Amino acid sequence: MNVFDNALELAKAQAWAVNEAAQAMSGCVGAVMEASAAFARSNTERNMEFAATLMGAKTLENAAEIHGAFVRDSVRASGAMAIKLTDACTQAAKECSALAAAAANGPKGSSES
């Protein structure tokens, strides 16, 4: 195998690795976007329910209780969103780690001469 053949094999391996990494990151970005859209919809519904409930408060103490419940619910929802984002990024990191391990072997179906 001459220098040109080695360079060609290296270029193929790099193109393969870039494609695999792009697919892994695309999956992560897609999961983050889906989770963000669901979170935004949920937040809108929660905010509208909060406003309607708050307007029905009979006393200042009742309004404070309603607000406290809203804040607790919002913090829980934010925590759940953080977990979803963490899960998506963890999955992408696992895929990239597997890619790094596979990159040592070159692209699937590459021929060794």
Image (tube, grey):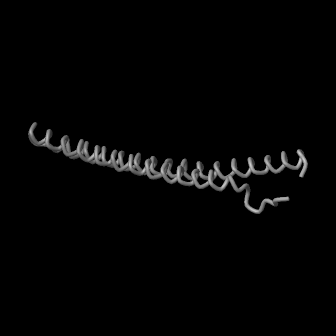
Towards the viewer: 23 or 36: 23
Residue found at x 27% / y 48%: 49
Residue found at x 59% / y 48%: 25
Q: Position of residue 42 (x, y in %)?
A: 36, 50
Q: Position of residue 61 (x, y in %)?
A: 9, 39
Image quadrant occupied by the C terminus = bottom right
Q: Is residue 96 left or right of residue 49?
A: right
Q: Quadrant of residue 3?
A: top right
Q: Position of residue 80 (x, y in %)?
A: 35, 50
Residue found at x 14% / y 39%: 64
Towards the viewer: 46 or 91: 91
Q: Is residue 62 left or right of residue 111?
A: left
In the image, farthest residue toward the top: 60
Q: Is residue 48 left or right of residue 28?
A: left
Towards the viewer: 66 or 20: 20
Q: Position of residue 59 (x, y in %)?
A: 9, 39
Q: Is residue 85 left or right of residue 68?
A: right
In the image, farthest residue toward the bottom: 109
Q: How many marks?
A: 0
Residue found at x 68% / y 53%: 104
